[in-house]
Image (tube, rainbow, N blue to C red):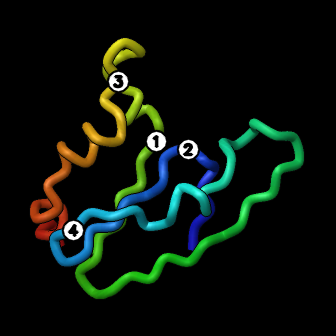
Amino acid sequence: TLVCGGLETPLRCRNGELTEAISRKDAGLPLGLVLGNEYTARTVELDPGDTVLIFSDGVSDAGGSDDPFGRPGLTKAIRCEDVCSAH
């Protein structure tokens, strides 16, 4: 179970495929953006061998405002086979 403050959603590696562990819609608004906004805990179903990757927006923002690493850069850099074989 986790709560996402609306920034980067965790990723799940399952059977060699990298997907969002929770949807961006379920992540809600960025923390602190709206006074009194409530966040809902979400349950992520994990199977044996699954890996969850949790990271801050500092990873996707790396590289500067002109050329941020971004979510595509992160998913391209992560090879699911390598992450899943780390067990």
* Badge 2 vs badge 1, beta-carbon distance below 8 Å: yes
Tell me the number on the disc at residue 18.
none
In the foreground, 87 or 52: 52
For disc 1, the neighbor class at 10 Å (few under 14, some 14 to 19, many from 20) is few
Q: Secondary structure at mark 3?
A: loop
Mark toward the viewer: 1 or 4 = 4
Relative to 76, is 22 above or below?
below
Residue wearing tag 1: 56
Residue 2 coordinates in the image, percent (x, y): 58, 67
State if disc 4 and disc 2 touch (CB < 8 Å): no
The quarter of the picture where the C terminus appears is bottom left
> Which of the 4 image quarters holds residue 80?
bottom left
Upstream in sequence: badge 1 or badge 4:
4
Q: Which residue in the protein does label 2 denote? A: 7
First in sequence: mark 2 or mark 1? 2
Q: Residue at x 34, y 67 (%)?
A: 12
Q: From the image, state whether disc 3 or disc 1 is nearer to you.
A: 3
Secondary structure, mark 1, is loop
The residue under label 4 is 17
Q: Residue 68, percent across and down?
A: 35, 24
Q: Earlier in the sequence, mark 3 or mark 2?
A: 2
Marks 1 and 4, how far apart in space? 21 Å
Q: Nearer the viewer, residue 49 or 74?
A: 74
What residue did someone put label 3 on? 68
Residue 29 in the figure: left or right of residue 25 = right
Q: Residues within 10 Å of mark 4 (few under 14, many from 20)?
A: few
Q: Residue at x 23, y 81 (%)?
A: 49
Distance CA(mark 2)–CA(mark 1): 8 Å
Is there a contact, CB below 8 Å, between mark 3 and mark 1?
no
